[in-house]
């Protein structure tokens, strides 16, 4: 069963591009990463799925329900964590949590109390007095207290300190094990690499690659690190060249024999060939252009 | 019901401040009446020399020396303008404040349709107007009783009914406009209420501009005419309610399709 499916989903803001012909499939129970820099279309995609903005054309289904026709049923089964956690400044945290539960028509007192304790949030304080990090914690509680089937997170960790980030992902992993689908939009690639099974990369409103995080990382590009006197100039497809005193590091995606031939003719002291991390892959996709894994 | 309660909580302070302020001014005005009554001869002479100015405020039709005349002019202006400004302020910010304060994202990502959100907010808007008017009426009646005057029930109830209708019309139009705004322009609402007030003054001064009475809700909420005729102009009231209904309908249509950015 698909938790999210889009077909040719397109959004234009007047003449400006939001997303173009976006095809996406997220299976139920997945921990899915949605990667792209600011302005790539991540938030536009999420806002269409949440019913905040209207699509220009295309189709989208969330939990097998059409977003144009069954918005309320969809929203009752989704938890949403916005990138900007902005609430009513005069309300107290506990009143906001209760309002969110009432809008879901659920008694979530036990879960919310547990989440407040785990995230170390004092819900009796007024929202206007809370730091951005504490407002983010409030948003996390509102997103999770009603036990959603799908949780959509838009840049979730901004504002949370490292300890809270760890606790937050711990909660997400526990929920994911119990069957909750997680759709994590982020430009922090280490987050996606650590927690997500599959991911899609979006660039200028289009999906340019999607697949398992392992598959995405397994491109022909390799990170070559050489210690000793080595000059890679003349080799094809050398990118991200970094030179230090006696070491050279670069991404290489052409014929490996060409590289070995060149290496054998020069005096080197050490050599390592490794899979690049997702950050490097991300740059690779952004410089290479469209490539479907 | 959740949205309704939430909205009432959000608007509680403003409601209290406006209600107490208007009621206080009402009470002060009524308590001034016995003194005014004694000086009526001089006041009437003054107004008779003011020509169009008296006509603008309907002071050519009633006597300041009677409680109903005094009430229609003095108290009418306080509630007519004060109540309208409150209604405009509430109406114009009802939907747009959520976008201005970036809280629309929170509200609209819960399983509640936009139609239900709007209905809850609209009900809260009308309820607040009713609370303000009920309290002001109560204070007014207590004040009249306290100064030892007979309470002209029919005139007073009709006057207050007209002001409730006026506020509902302005609030409804502003509510509709609110759906089109993103930054909660309070000035638009307050400006609209003041323009409508002055349109009626222009209609009172110039015969050729009398049609403006059919545009401004102050046309049917003209206190001096109400206490003179002891009735409301049905055509103007129906037209006014129609304008309000159009405002609400436009608001519903717009907000249901609006992109929340």
Image (tube, rainbow, N blue to C red):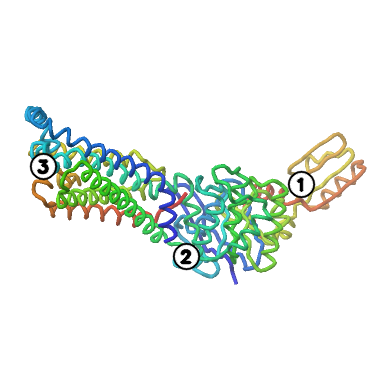
Mark 2 lies on residue: A72
Host chain of mark 2: A
Report helix, strand or loop for mark 3.
helix
Query: Separation of disc 2 and disc 3 at Cα?
Result: 49 Å
Examine the rendered structure and indicate whether residue A45 appears above or below residue B20. below
Mark 3 lies on residue: B210
Mark 1 lies on residue: A251
In-image side of B35 versus A234 (left or right): left
Q: Do the residues labelled 1 and 2 touch (CB within 8 Å)?
A: no
Q: Report x, y in % for residue A224.
A: 82, 47
Report helix, strand or loop for mark 2.
helix
Q: Which class describes the residues within 10 Å of circle 1: few (<14), some (14-19), or many (20+)? A: many
Q: Report x, y in % for residue B177.
A: 32, 48
Query: Separation of disc 3 and disc 1 at Cα?
Result: 81 Å
Q: Nearer the viewer, mark 1 or mark 2?
A: 2
Q: Would residue B33 be seen by someone viewing this image from the given angle?
A: yes
Quarter occupied by residue B257: bottom left
Answer yes or no: are tags 3 and 1 on the same subunit.
no
> Relative to the observer, which residue lies in front, A262 or A177?
A177
Q: Would residue B51 be seen by someone viewing this image from the given angle?
A: no
Q: Report x, y in % for residue B8.
A: 41, 52
Looking at the rendering, in which quadrant would you find the N terminus of chain A? bottom right
Answer yes or no: are tags 1 and 2 on the same subunit.
yes
């Amino acid at each position: 069963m698909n938790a999210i499916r889009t077909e040719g989903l397109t959004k234009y803001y007047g003449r400006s591009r939001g997303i173009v012909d976006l095809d996406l499939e997220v299976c139920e129970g997945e921990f899915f990463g949605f990667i792209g820099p600011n302005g790539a279309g991540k938030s536009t995609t999420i806002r269409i799925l949440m019913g905040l903005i209207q699509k220009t054309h295309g189709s989208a289904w969330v939990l097998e329900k059409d977003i144009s026709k069954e918005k309320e049923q969809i929203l009752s089964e989704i938890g949403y964590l916005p990138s900007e956690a902005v609430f009513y400044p005069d309300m107290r945290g506990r009143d906001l949590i209760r309002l969110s539960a009432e809008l879901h028509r659920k008694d979530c007192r036990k879960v919310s109390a547990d989440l407040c304790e785990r995230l170390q949030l004092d819900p009796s304080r007024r929202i206007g007095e809370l730091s951005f990090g504490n407002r983010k914690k409030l948003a996390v509680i509102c997103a999770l207290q009603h036990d959603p089937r799908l949780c959509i997170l838009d840049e979730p960790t901004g504002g949370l300190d490292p300890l809270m980030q760890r606790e937050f992902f711990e909660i997400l992993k526990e929920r994911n094990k119990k069957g909750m689908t997680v759709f994590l939009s982020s430009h922090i690639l280490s987050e996606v690499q650590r927690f997500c099974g599959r991911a899609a990369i979006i660039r200028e409103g289009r999906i340019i690659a999607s697949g398992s995080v392992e598959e995405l990382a397994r491109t022909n590009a390799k990170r070559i690190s050489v210690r000793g006197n080595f000059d890679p100039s003349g080799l094809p497809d050398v990118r991200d060249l970094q030179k230090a005193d006696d070491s050279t590091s670069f991404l290489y995606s052409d014929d490996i024999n060409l590289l070995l031939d060149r290496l054998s003719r020069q005096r080197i002291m050490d050599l390592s060939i490794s899979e690049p991390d997702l950050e490097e892959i991300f740059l690779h996709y952004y410089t290479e252009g469209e490539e479907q894994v | 019901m959740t949205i309704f309660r939430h909205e009432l909580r959000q608007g509680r302070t403003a409601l209290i401040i406006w209600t107490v302020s208007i009621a206080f001014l009402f009470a002060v005005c009524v308590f001034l009446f016995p003194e005014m009554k004694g000086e009526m001869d001089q006041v009437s002479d003054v107004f008779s020399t003011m020509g169009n100015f008296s006509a603008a405020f309907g002071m050519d039709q009633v006597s300041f020396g009677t409680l109903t005349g005094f009430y229609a002019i003095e108290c009418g202006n306080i509630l007519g303008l004060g109540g309208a400004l409150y209604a405009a302020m509430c109406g114009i910010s009802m939907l747009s404040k959520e976008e201005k304060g970036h809280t629309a994202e929170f509200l609209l990502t819960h399983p509640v349709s936009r139609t239900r959100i709007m209905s809850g907010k609209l009900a809260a808007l009308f309820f607040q107007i009713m609370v303000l008017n009920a309290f002001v009426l109560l204070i007014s009646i207590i004040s009249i009783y306290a100064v030892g005057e007979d309470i002209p029930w029919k005139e007073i109830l009709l006057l207050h009914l007209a002001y409730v209708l006026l506020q509902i019309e302005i609030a409804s139009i502003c509510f509709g406009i609110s759906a089109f705004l993103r930054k909660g322009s309070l000035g638009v609402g307050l400006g609209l209420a003041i323009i409508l007030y002055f349109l009626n003054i222009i209609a009172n001064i110039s015969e050729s501009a009398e049609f403006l009475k059919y545009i401004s809700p102050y046309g049917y909420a003209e206190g001096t005419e109400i206490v003179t005729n002891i009735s409301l102009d049905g055509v103007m009231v129906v037209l006014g309610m129609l304008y309000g209904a159009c405002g609400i309908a436009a608001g519903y249509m717009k907000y249901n399709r609006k992109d929340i950015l």
